[in-house]
Amino acid sequence: MVEEVLVVLKRRELPESWTLRTFLDTGGYQGLRKALTEMTPQEVIEVVQGSGLRGRGGAGMGTGLKWSLIPKDSPKDRYVVCNGDEGEPGAFHDRELMEVDPHALIEGMLCSAYAVGAKHCFIYCRGEFILAHERLAAAIKEAYDNNYLGDNILGTGFSCDMVLHRGAGAYICGEETALLESLEGYRGMPRPRPPFPVTEGLYASPTVVNNVQSLQAAGQVVLNGADWYRRWGTEKSPGTLVCSVSGAVNAPRNVEVPLGTTVQEVLELCGGIDDRGLKAFAPGGWSTPMLPPDKLDATMDYEGMIAAGSVLGASSIIAVPNDMCIVRAVWRGSKFYSHESCGKCTPCREGTYWVEHILERIEHGHGHPGDLERLEKVNNGMSGFKSLCALAEFAAGPVGSSIIHFRHEYEEHIRLGACPMRTETAIAS
């Protein structure tokens, strides 16, 4: 049986893991000290790039590659922004990382700031994460009081300030350009690209935007080296991955495993499937195409999930139980995406609205012949990245995949004029 490999979650069980005292006692800020005293900014970029560390926010872009794209000759200020606006249904690993180890995030951001020449860092924390916000605020104060933030950090001449910004609970602000709009005080809506944030991001200046997990891992890569991080994972997807696991499992929680671990092995670390049994699973949060149980041998890495017919996404496995109506589950998800669409792009604004209402009609027994084909047509209109951000694509994933794997459930709803599972429950009672 596979075992957990704790890299970014290594302080999870320590008493008061969120304090500076515990962080320093367990090697904290040694990566920053090494970067500032023994390495050039370019060497920091090269070691992170050499480690193969990829963004854990879903896109999977190389973290070091993104840092290397910041123009070195720009006269503008440069910024580092942490995307802590975790809103994907089924994902809760960034929240735990910010709660249990906030100083590791600060250290990773400072390593990034030093590498790209930034003097200002911003943490965009989701508004609902009350405890994470409190601990981040306390950690930032501790870092300032002990010369890990501010002027002349550790006497090296490097200076950097950090701002903690609290979001207002908009799913769209998990998209990096919408996050930057919100950070500037505007309504969170995605920007056209190009230009990309690495050249014109926050305040139209070069900006690195990274996920919480990516930045925490980067600090350890700087300290321990590229080869150390490549001890785990696969050639194309090195390192470890924190997976949020929920749904029909006996012990829902976050687990950290080497990339390339199978879904079955991750589920076993969470006590296995519960008595309800497994009907399907979404491997990367609800926005990723769901897969049937015969895909449990698919690997939790970027290439493995694509080969299985889905994507790694937010690496958050939702196990759908046998007693769950797929149509109802997908309809409830569609309500979320329809509500969270910012309305800027027509395929998303109109598509999420009509998908929600067609699904509602089918689930409540008012479906009629032609609805399933109509649903497919509208859903296909959202697919293929036709909008400025990926929200429409995310909304389309569970709908399209559920029709592929569970078309019979939709057809039964329409044929019976009711949800078959509700009808069975009523008869049994």
Image: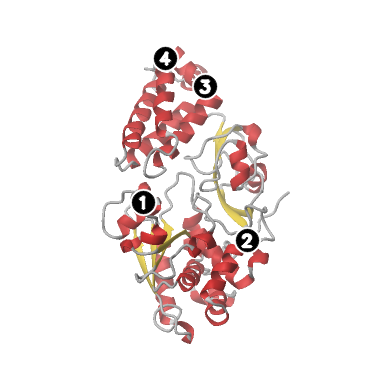
**Residue at mark 1 to residue at mark 3: CA–CA distance:** 33 Å
Q: Which element is circle 3 on?
A: helix
Q: Which element is circle 2 on?
A: loop
Q: Which of pointers 4 and 1 lies earlier in the amino acid sequence?
A: 1
Identify the residue at image location x=52%, y=36%.
289
Front of the two marks 3 and 4:
3
**Residue at mark 2 to residue at mark 4: CA–CA distance:** 50 Å
Q: Quadrant of residue 231?
A: bottom right
Residue 379: x percent and y percent?
A: 42, 29
Q: Nearer the viewer, residue 375 or 377?
A: 377
| Residue closest to the far right | 1
Residue 288: x percent and y percent?
A: 50, 39
Mark 1–mark 3 contact, CB under 8 Å? no
Query: Which residue is denoted by mark 4 in the rendering?
Result: 417
Front of the two marks 2 and 1:
1
Q: Nearer the viewer, residue 88 or 113?
A: 113
Can residue 179 be seen at all in this image of the molecule?
yes
Q: Amino acid at mark 4?
A: Gly
Disc 4: CA contacts within 10 A as few (<14), some (14-19) or many (>=20): some
Q: Which of pointers 3 and 4 lies earlier in the amino acid sequence?
A: 3
Query: Which residue is denoted by mark 3 in the rendering?
Result: 407
Colour option used:
secondary structure
**Residue at mark 2 to residue at mark 1: CA–CA distance:** 29 Å
Q: Is residue 2 above or below residue 159?
A: above
Query: Which residue is denoted by mark 2 in the rendering?
Result: 6
Q: Which of pointers 2 and 1 lies earlier in the amino acid sequence?
A: 2
Q: Amino acid at mark 1?
A: Cys
Query: Which residue is denoted by mark 1 in the rendering?
Result: 173
Image side of residue 36 versus residue 50, left or right: left
Q: Which of pointers 2 and 4 lies earlier in the amino acid sequence?
A: 2
Q: Which of pointers 1 and 3 lies earlier in the amino acid sequence?
A: 1
| Residue closest to the far front | 73
